[in-house]
Amino acid sequence: MDLRVVTHYLNIGNFTGFAILLLLNILLAGCGGGEGGGGEGPMVDISFPLPNSNLGGEADRVVLRGRVTTTDGARVNQVLINNQSFRMVTQKPPADLPDGDMPMVEFDRDDSSHWFAQIALLQQVNDISIDASDDRNRSTSVTLAVQNGATFSRPVDVVLDSTNNRVLLVDSSSAALLAVNLASGDRRLISGLNTGTGVSFVSPKGLALDIANNRALVVDSSRPGRGLNALLAVDLTTGNRTVISNEDITRATDVALDMANNRVLWVKSSALLAVDLNSGEQVVVSQEGEAGDGIPFSIPEYVVLAANGRALVVDAGLAALLEVDLSNGDRRVISGVSTGSGTALQFPRAAAVDADNSRALVVDEGLNAVLEIDLSNGNRRVISNISKGQGPLFGIPEGIAFDMANNRVLVVDFESLLEVDLVSGDRRVISDPNAIQIAGPSFFQPRGVTLDKTNNRLLVADGGRAEDGRSPNYSLLEVDLATGDRRLISGADRGVGPMFILLESVALDAANNRALVTDIRLDALLAVDLTSGDRRVISDADKGDGPSLNRPLDMVLDAANNRALVLDPSLTALLEIDLDNGDRRVISDASRGVGLPFEGPSGVVLDAANNRAFVVDPDLGISPDKSAVLKVDLDSGDREILSGVGNKGAGPVFGRPISIALDLDNNRVLVGDGANGGLKALFEVDLTSGDRQVISDSANGSGPAFNAVLNMALDSDNNRIFLADLVSNTLVVVDLISGDKAIYSGRINN
C-alpha cells in the first residue's frame, strides 16, 4: 500500500477551538488512478461521535473517528477538517496527549480509509465540518454537530444564583453539583466525578447557596450505610468539597441556610435540625417529644426560611405545609387536608417563599403541578399543570426556586430545568440533556436495544410517556443513526394487538420484517411487525406448551433453528421458544445440565458458530466474588464459568454485571456492569482465558458516566456499542477503541 502524506501548517491565531487541515495523497486499498468525470465524490462516514450526541462537558478534546472511501477507482487527495494546523502520528491514537500538544491526525496502517483526528471542544454545541475531494475534482461535505454540555439525569434540588444569572442544582444520579446559565441553558459541572478535590458525592439530596462565602452547602444522605450522610461545603470556583458535619446526618432530604445564625437547617424523617457552620455541631430545632409542640412531622421533604424567625417545612406524608417557630420548635399546619381551601396537596416536594405576596410556591409531584399557598389562610391555587399554562408537561417535578425579578419559578423536573410564568402558568424548557433538538417521542425507560444495520437504526424497547406526562406508555421505538431522531413503531398509538405492559428486551428478525420482544408483565414473547406496528403473541401461558414464563428478562434470536433463547431469572433457567408454535423447553437450569446452577441470570447472547450461549449472572457466588459469565452448551445444557466466580480469569473483579454482547471477531464478550452496587463500567472478557479488562468507566474514556446498563447493541463495523441506560433514560454510545462515551439519544422535552 502506497501512503503518501503531505502536511501543511496554518497560523489561525486566537481561534476558538482547534481545527485541522489535512492534505492527503492516499492510495486507498483496492483503488487505483482514474480519469476525470462525473459521479459521486468520496464517501465520508463518522463512527464516533455520532451526529447530535452529547460528550458530557468534562472533556476539552475528543478523538473524532471515521472513514473516507471511494467506489470507482478515484483517489482521495484532500480532506479538510475545519481549517487549522495539525501534527501527523501513526496508527492508533495515544491514550492522552500532553497539555498544549498539537491536535493530531492518524490513519490506520491496516486500513488507510480509517482515520482518527483529535480536536479540542468548545462547551455546548460544536459544529465540525469535514470536506473530502478526489483526483477527479469531486468533493463531499459533511457537517457534524455534537454537544459538550454537562448532563443531569435526576436533579433533586435547585437554588437561584441571581448575581451570576444561573441556577445551581444537585443531581442524585450523576452525584454532582452543576450550574445552568439561565440565558443560554448551558450546563457546567462545578463539582463531581473528576472535578474538585475532597470526599466524593454519593447521594446528594439538598442544596443551599452561601453567596457571601462563594460556596454551596450540600447534604449528601441516605439510609444508614448508604450515602456520605454528611453536610459538605463546595467551593464554587474550584469544586473542592469539605465536610462540615457528618454527625448522624442520615435520611436528610434538604437544607436551608440561616445566615443570621451561621447555621444550616436540615430535615430528616422526623425532625428539623440545625448544624453550626463553624463547629459542625448539631441541635434539634423541632421534633415530637424533643423540641416544640404541635403536629408531629411525618415525611418532611423540604425546608425554607420564612420571615419573623419561622421556617416552612413541606411534609409529603401529611400532604401539608407546616410552619416551625425557630425559637421554640412549635409546629403548626399552614395548609393541608383540613386547613385552607382549593386543590388539595397530594405529594408536595419543595417550596419557595414569595414574601412580597405573602405566599409559598409549592411543587407537587403527585399533582404534577406548581401551586401557590396563601400564608395567611392556607388557601391553595394551581398556577401551572396539565390544564393551566402552555408548554411541556411536568414529569417528576422535585425542586423549585423563586426568581422574583422575572416573576417566575424555576423547576427541576427529571432531566430538565423548566421556567414557569407565575401569571400565565406557561412552561418553557431552559435546559435539558440535548441542546440540539431531537425529533420524535421521548424516552422514559429504555430497557432493550438492538441494531438494525440494514436500515441504519436502533430498535428500542421503552416505556414512553402517557398523556399525563408521567405514566409509562410502553412502546417499541426506532432511533435513526444518522440524526438521533426517534419514531414510534408500535405502542398505544400505533399497531393493533395486545398492549405492552412492561417491555424488557428486543431482537431483530430481519428475514420476517419483525422484532421479537419480551414483556415481563405479560410473561410473554411477542412479535411486532416493523411496517404496521401490529403485535402478536408468540408464546405465553395460553399459547405453546412447556414451562410457563415467569419473568422473561432477556432474549436472543437463533434464526437458524427458528427459535428464541429466553433467560428467565424467576425460573433461574435458559429456555428455548419455538417461533412457529410457541412451545417452550428448558435448555439449562438446576435440573438440566451440569455445572454451577444459575441464581439471578440477567443477560444472554448466542454464539451460533460454537453452539453455545454466554450468560451473565450477578448473583452466582458469595460476595465479593459472586458475579460471572458462563458458557452454556445448547445441546446438553452444561454450564461452565468463563470468567468471575472461582477466580476464573485475571483482571478487575465484576461489581454487578447485568448485560452482555458478543464480539466474536475479537474473541470476546462485552459486559455492562452498572446495576445497583455495580461499577458503572464496560468490560471485555477474553473468550479463551476469561481475562477481564475495563474498556470504559469513569477513569477510562471521557464523557458522561452510564448507570444501569440493562441491554447493549454492538455495532462491530464501527467499533462502537450502544447501551440502554435505565437511570439516565438515554442511549449511551461507547467508542470501543478509546472508551469515550456520549449520550446519543435521550429523554427530550420537545
Image: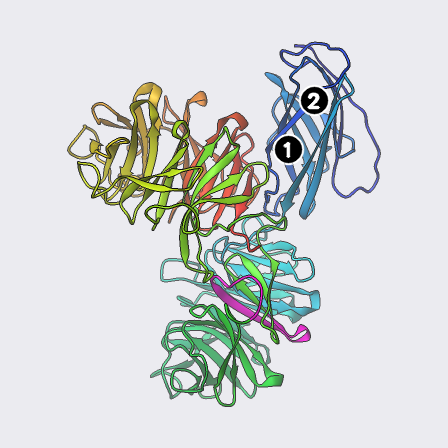
Per the image, the residue denoted by label 2 is 40
Q: CA distance from mark 1 to mark 2?
A: 24 Å
> Percent from the top left, x then y, of residue 330?
42, 87
Q: Nearer the viewer, residue 509 or 676?
A: 509
Which numbered tag is attached to residue 86? Answer: none
> Percent from the top left, x then y, of residue 626?
30, 40
Q: Is residue 121 magenta?
A: no
Q: Residues within 10 Å of mark 1 (few under 14, many from 20)?
A: some
Q: Residues within 10 Å of mark 2 (few under 14, many from 20)?
A: few
Circle 2: residue type = Glu
SS type, badge 1:
strand
Residue name at image x 38 percent, y 39 percent: 528
Residue 596 position by quadrant = top left
Left-right relation of 36 to 143: right
Q: Quadrant of the C terminus?
A: bottom right
Q: Is residue 282 above or below residue 517?
A: below
Range of residues picked out in magenta:
389-409
Inspect this view and state whether residue 603 appears. Answer: no
Per the image, the residue denoted by label 1 is 64
